[in-house]
Image (tube, rainbow, N blue to C red):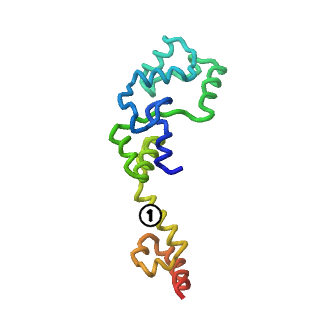
Amino acid sequence: MNDLGKINKMNIADSTNVVSKEANYGSNLHDSQKEMDKLPHSGFSSKIEDGVISTPKGERPSPGRYMTDVEIKKHLALFDDGAVVFYTISKENADRAFKSPQDAYEVMIYAETGQWPNVKEEKKNADRELMKKFPELLIRIPSNQELFTEDELKELMPLARKALE
């Protein structure tokens, strides 16, 4: 399956909607909250939950003050297989995913990580691997040498010369 096919199956807005050209871009906080309500919860009273959540991070009490050891273990077990993170994808970025496989890949990475991929660095690494596989390209196209340190070139240039023989 290509990247564009993957992006069509991705979970972007919430756990029931997937990106498609017909995606409901009007999804809102209420829809996301309904999806969150389907997930397992701690079972705390709203008084305790609201009190902890309303306390600024860094000032919150240790969980041992309002949870038993069994409750803490049960809560932590919810994350044994990882956690779900939601990143908002704008209509502009959802549309971008359908422009090209490269754009689909970039939007997919953003949806999975919340960060845009470093395409230049990835291309540089791919080019470096190609030069290692075909070192003669370091001689045929001298600008490729800029991808490597002097020490790396000391190893690769003899291989490049040998490949051209």
Q: Is residue 55 above or below residue 86?
A: above
Question: Between residues 154 and 145, which one lies in front from this camera angle?
Answer: 145
Task: Estimate the x, y position of residue 93 in percent, counting from the top left.
Answer: 36, 42
Q: Is residue 158 above or below residue 48?
A: below
Residue at point 45% right, 50% down?
Answer: 105
Residue at point 43% right, 37% down?
Answer: 19
Question: Between residues 98 and 11, which one lies in front from this camera angle?
Answer: 98
Q: Is residue 35 above or below residue 164?
A: above
Task: Estimate the x, y position of residue 71 in percent, counting from the top left.
Answer: 63, 20
Q: Is residue 92 above or below residue 155?
A: above
Task: Estimate the x, y position of residue 161 in percent, counting from the top left.
Answer: 52, 85
Question: On the image, which quarter does residue 54 sit in?
Answer: top left
Residue at point 50% right, 16% down?
Answer: 49
Classify mark 1: helix, strand or loop. Answer: helix
The residue most toward the right is: 70
Residue at point 43% right, 52% down?
Answer: 101
Alpha-carbon neighbours of circle 1 within 10 Å: few (<14), some, or many (≥20)? few
The residue most toward the front is: 22
- The amino acid at mark 1 is Lys
Question: Between residues 24 and 52, which one lies in front from this camera angle?
Answer: 24
Task: Estimate the x, y position of residue 55 in percent, counting from the top left.
Answer: 43, 20
Question: Between residues 150 and 1, which one lies in front from this camera angle?
Answer: 1
**Disc 1 marks which residue?**
124
Q: Name the image quarter holding the C terminus.
A: bottom right
